[in-house]
């Protein structure tokens, strides 16, 4: 009801009851210019029973937003905004009033470097790894890559808040073009968003692969492959030939992971030779790490730039080699004749057949099978192999520690052993501290896998909105001078009287992550690293080829590769 003296703004004719609802298409924001051209800078509409005023001039905007700001600063209620604001208990959709004021006062976004228009902090991507910017902006730092808000966490306390206290709100994963490809449309474990499908896949992996019984069952595979490694290295040592550590260790770990995960023996395989493993892992890392424009600029523009710049084509070429490898593994399992379930892929195929019969709600598809193969290969091989390369690198760089650990090993195990078994691992103490120190100084995944918030959450008093990416800089935390004495020094003795462990309960040391998304292959990874390292240290003495310096072999940022001389002990 309007008082008769009121002067309402002009606007299109209104029908009884519905008002201007039938004109919504014409009133779409894109067409509102026509509207103001026809009716002036202040147009009056009515949607059903709701009066709406559209403002389209600088002067009128000033009156609303400045002169009459207080009278005009509430928000309308709709069913949609009620739902997403949890009954208007938020800042964006709450009506003006004490509650809104209190919420707004509470809302503090984390600090971060200044953001350029549109690209945000994309130009600083290089400065991000592993710990540069947080020195300046603190342990909870906000960046923006294009349209994507990213929070970088670099303190033990903030990591605990994300991974333990608010684990549920922070346990999804962001989507990128690269992870979409290698996860077969997020039908995997590592890159799938949080939800029923991820839960089903993760449970399946534990039942079929990552449980204590299966771990024990696969022990002979791990020991046999290590025996082969010792044999190969012995031949090289006898002729005093240098070893390509990267190729050797990627082949070792690749052979074990492929045998355990897919029943695939790389030494006899028809479709791949064992030397190609490290190339394939490099390719998967390109897909995981390279960013596409469409990751930061959603919609057509990003996809168009990816296409025009040739980025799409390059991406697809890299992916095609991996896909062929995974496809071959799958085809091997689909060949008729396999009845018994022996590895996880066989287990999944049997489950698929059962689901066809029973009509279960969660249906496994070929993409789930490939997603699982991709995860096991990508997550399993490079993590353990690069940890091993770092272990030898640090020990060669620190001869005193090398001597101390080899003395322990050789004294404890005696010097007449023909082969090392996993039982030998249980007898060593200092050796385990060396492994712990390697996990501290060289976490294989320095920022963990990125997480994404499912809802608004407060971390260290800062507001982190829903759908924000969270990166936990476990590299920086494990070298935080507040927590560690001489943090950059390789010194396993620091753990002599310490109860700190790396299995996800101590937030200063998180090489496997923590919470719901913690690495499910942790036990397997630790055993892979420990058994191989024990073999390398028991049977061989290590040094650099003549004229090489260790620091030259270690490239700028954290990739230890290279040729290392082995001498038979
Ligand atoms: C030294 C060896 C390893 C290290 C350091 C390592 C580290 C990690 C880290 C940091 C994450 C991310 C955790 C998070 O986001 O909070 C992860 C996830 C994962 N890892 Fe490992 N990993 C290792 C070995 C393995 C192995 C051997 C496998 C399997 C064969 C494996 C399978 C996975 C999978 C499937 C995920 C995704 C979990 C999820 O998102 O739910 N990892 N790993």
Image (spheres, rainbow, N blue to C red):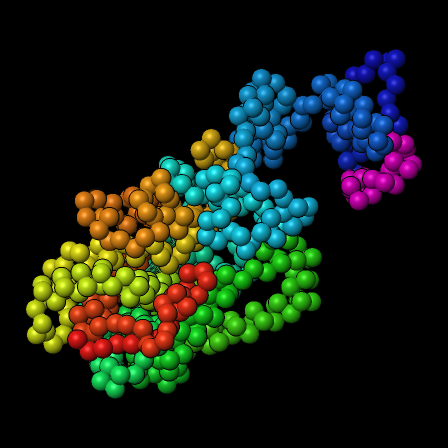
The quarter holding residue 300 reads bottom right
Vertical comparison of 214 with 468: above or below: below
Number of numbered tags placed on the structure image: 0
Vertical comparison of 56 with 434: above or below: above
Q: Is residue 318 left or right of residue 37?
A: left
Residue 229 at x, y = what percent?
25, 77
**257 part of magenta stretch:** no
Image: magenta residue range: 23-42
Q: Is residue 149 left or right of residue 330?
A: right
The quarter holding residue 357 reads bottom left
Q: Judge by depth and name the residue closer to the eye, 281 or 260.
A: 281
Q: Judge by depth and name the residue closer to the eye, 222 or 331.
A: 222
Q: Answer with the quadrant where ligand 1 appears in the image.
A: bottom left
Residue with the most extreme right position: 38
The quarter holding residue 372 reads bottom left
Q: Residue at x 47, y 35 (%)?
A: 457
């Amino acid at each position: 009801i309007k008082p008769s003296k009121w002067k309402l703004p002009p606007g299109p004719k209104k029908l009884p009851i519905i008002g201007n609802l039938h004109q919504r298409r014409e009133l779409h924001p894109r067409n509102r210019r026509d509207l103001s051209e026809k009716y002036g800078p202040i147009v009056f509409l009515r949607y059903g029973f709701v009066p709406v005023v559209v403002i389209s001039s600088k002067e009128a905007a000033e009156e609303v937003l400045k002169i009459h700001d207080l009278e005009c600063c509430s928000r309308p209620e709709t069913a949609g905004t009620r739902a997403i604001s949890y009954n208007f208990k938020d800042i964006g959709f709450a009506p003006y009033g004490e509650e809104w004021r209190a919420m707004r006062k509470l809302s503090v976004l984390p600090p971060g470097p200044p953001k350029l228009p549109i690209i945000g902090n994309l130009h600083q991507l290089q400065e991000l790894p592993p710990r540069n910017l947080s020195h300046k902006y603190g342990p909870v730092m906000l960046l923006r890559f294009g349209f994507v808000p990213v929070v970088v966490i670099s303190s033990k306390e903030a990591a605990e808040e994300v991974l333990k206290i608010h684990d549920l709100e922070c346990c999804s994963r962001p989507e990128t073009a690269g992870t979409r490809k290698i996860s077969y449309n997020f039908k995997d474990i590592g890159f799938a968003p949080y939800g029923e499908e991820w839960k089903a896949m993760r449970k399946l992996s534990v039942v079929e692969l990552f449980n204590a019984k299966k771990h024990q069952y696969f022990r002979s595979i791990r020991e046999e492959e290590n025996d082969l490694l010792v044999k190969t290295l012995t031949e090289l040592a006898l002729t005093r030939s240098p070893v390509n550590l990267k190729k050797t260790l990627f082949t070792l770990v690749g052979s074990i992971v492929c045998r355990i995960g897919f029943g695939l023996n790389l030494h006899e395989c028809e479709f791949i030779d064992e030397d190609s493993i490290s190339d394939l892992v490099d390719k998967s890392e390109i897909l995981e790490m390279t960013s596409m424009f469409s990751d930061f600029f959603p919609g057509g523009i990003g996809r168009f730039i990816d296409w025009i710049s040739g980025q799409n084509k390059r991406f697809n070429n890299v992916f095609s080699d991996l896909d062929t490898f995974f496809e071959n593994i799958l085809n091997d399992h689909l060949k008729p004749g396999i009845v018994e379930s022996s590895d996880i892929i066989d287990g999944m195929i049997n489950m698929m057949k059962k689901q066809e019969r029973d009509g279960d709600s969660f249906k496994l598809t070929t993409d789930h099978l490939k997603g699982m193969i991709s995860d096991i290969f990508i997550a399993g091989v490079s993590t353990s192999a690069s940890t091993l390369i770092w272990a030898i690198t640090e020990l060669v760089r620190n001869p005193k520690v090398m001597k101390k650990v080899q003395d322990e090993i050789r004294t404890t195990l005696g010097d007449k052993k023909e082969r090392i078994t996993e039982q030998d691992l249980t007898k060593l103490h200092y050796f385990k501290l060396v492994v712990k120190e390697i996990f501290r100084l060289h976490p294989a995944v320095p920022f963990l896998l990125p997480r994404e918030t499912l809802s608004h959450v407060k971390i260290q008093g800062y507001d982190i909105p829903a759908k924000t990416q969270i990166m936990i800089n476990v590299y920086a935390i494990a070298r935080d001078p507040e927590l560690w004495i001489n943090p950059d020094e390789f010194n396993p003795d620091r753990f002599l009287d310490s109860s700190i462990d790396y299995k996800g309960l101590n937030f200063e040391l998180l090489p496997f992550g923590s919470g719901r998304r913690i690495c499910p292959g942790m036990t397997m990874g630790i055993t892979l690293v420990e058994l191989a390292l024990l073999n390398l240290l028991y049977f061989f003495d290590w040094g650099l080829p003549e004229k090489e310096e260790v620091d030259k072999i270690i490239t700028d940022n954290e990739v230890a590769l290279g040729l290392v001389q082995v001498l038979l002990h």
